[in-house]
Image: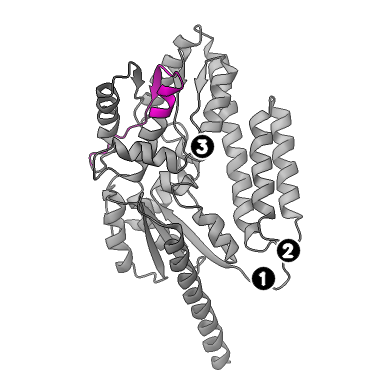
Amino acid sequence: MRLGIFHMGNVSLAARTFLRELKVEIVIPPPNSGTTLSLGTRYSPETACLPYKLILGNFLQDLEMGADTLIMVTSTNVACRMGFYARSMKGTLEDLGYKFEMIVPGDSERGLVNLLRFIKRRANNVSWLKLVSAFRFGLAKLSALDHLEQVVHRMRAVEKTKGTVNRLFQEAQEAIDQAGTWASLKELEKEYADRLTALPQDPQAQPLRVGVVGETFVLMDPFASRDLESELGKLGVEVRRRNFASRWLRPGVVSSGWKEEAHRAALPYLKRTVGGEGWESVGEKVLCSQDYDGMVHLLPFTCMPEIIAQNILPSVKEDIPVLTLICDEQTGKQGMLTRLEAFVDLLNRRRQRKKDESLSRC
């Protein structure tokens, strides 16, 4: 078996570790790029969303590189078209003449168990102990990178020499990818967290705090979001994000407290799931309006759950500015930067106005 996967931020790194520990041959496509997107767009339905096009592009590259088995996630929530994506992609790839098997584990705890059972059989029936140990090690790498990414979000806004944090984080990703033991992983996580925190800081920096919410794929994949978080950091903004890949992989296995908290907060405006992360997007605005200066709401073009959230967000009484950015293959980075600069300018003026009003009351 040669197992092909798709890219979504650091998830492919964790998958590579998991399968490498079990000695399962894995095919990893080139990092997401314009080539991947063009390839996926060419064979996608016209109204398919950006994640669909990028994943299909990855699968086409996997199959050209010799993969004979593909893993595709799905959703049982009827409000999101993701539930149909696996079937649609499989049909497209078969029509193009490819011979392969597609594994669709589902989004429940049972789906994850079924996936582990499948991998177990294909890994010479290794023991459950070894299988679970390898899975936990991959997840631990993802958690370490998510922790470092939170440090990166904080330090980008105050670093003295722009770009230093990004270079150090890339070095950390490569080092953690090569870590072979739990002890070395822990050491690397601490070492890079310390090095990031110790970078020279701009003493004049007073970073704005902006929450980034929205659909999971575009939140986690820098290519899909056009490096939004890095660009906000360059503008002196500290990014706050609560949805990380290590949490995304845990539904049904470990209680996801932040989601439950967001759902409760959203209840006055939205009483049930609408698929994807629409419920969480509304809840986070309610929960974090006191901590954030503003929010950026990211969604792929035609994403139904986030379109519902987009229409509810202006009604939330906790009033902070929200910038909605829609991502697809037509999205130009320069246009996005212009909107971000204008948004940050608005937030700075809003902060200054609040300071002036506070002083006038003294």
Of labels 2 and 3, earlier in sequence is 3
Q: Position of residue 285 (x, y in %)?
A: 41, 62
Q: Could you tell me which secondary element the residue under label 2 belongs to? A: loop
Residue 67 lies in the magenta-colored region: yes
Instruction: Give the residue number, with chain letter if any, for mark 3.
Output: 31
Q: Residues within 10 Å of mark 2 (few under 14, many from 20)?
A: some
Instruction: Give the residue number, with chain letter if any, for mark 1.
Output: 205
Q: Is residue 181 left or right of residue 16?
A: right
Q: Residue at x 34, y 28 (%)?
A: 106
Q: Could you tell me which secondary element the residue under label 1 belongs to? A: loop
Disc 1 or disc 3, which is closer to the eye?
Answer: 3
Q: Nearer the viewer, residue 98 or 133?
A: 98
Q: Position of residue 341 (x, y in %)?
A: 49, 69
Of labels 1 and 3, earlier in sequence is 3
Q: Decide: marks 1, 2 in contact (CB < 8 A)? A: yes
Q: Residue at x 43, y 67 (%)?
A: 339
| Labelled disc at residue 93 | none
Q: Could you tell me which secondary element the residue under label 3 belongs to? A: loop
Point out the stretch of residues depicted in magenta.
60-78
Q: Residues within 10 Å of mark 3 (few under 14, many from 20)?
A: some
Instruction: Give the residue number, with chain letter if any, for mark 2.
Output: 201
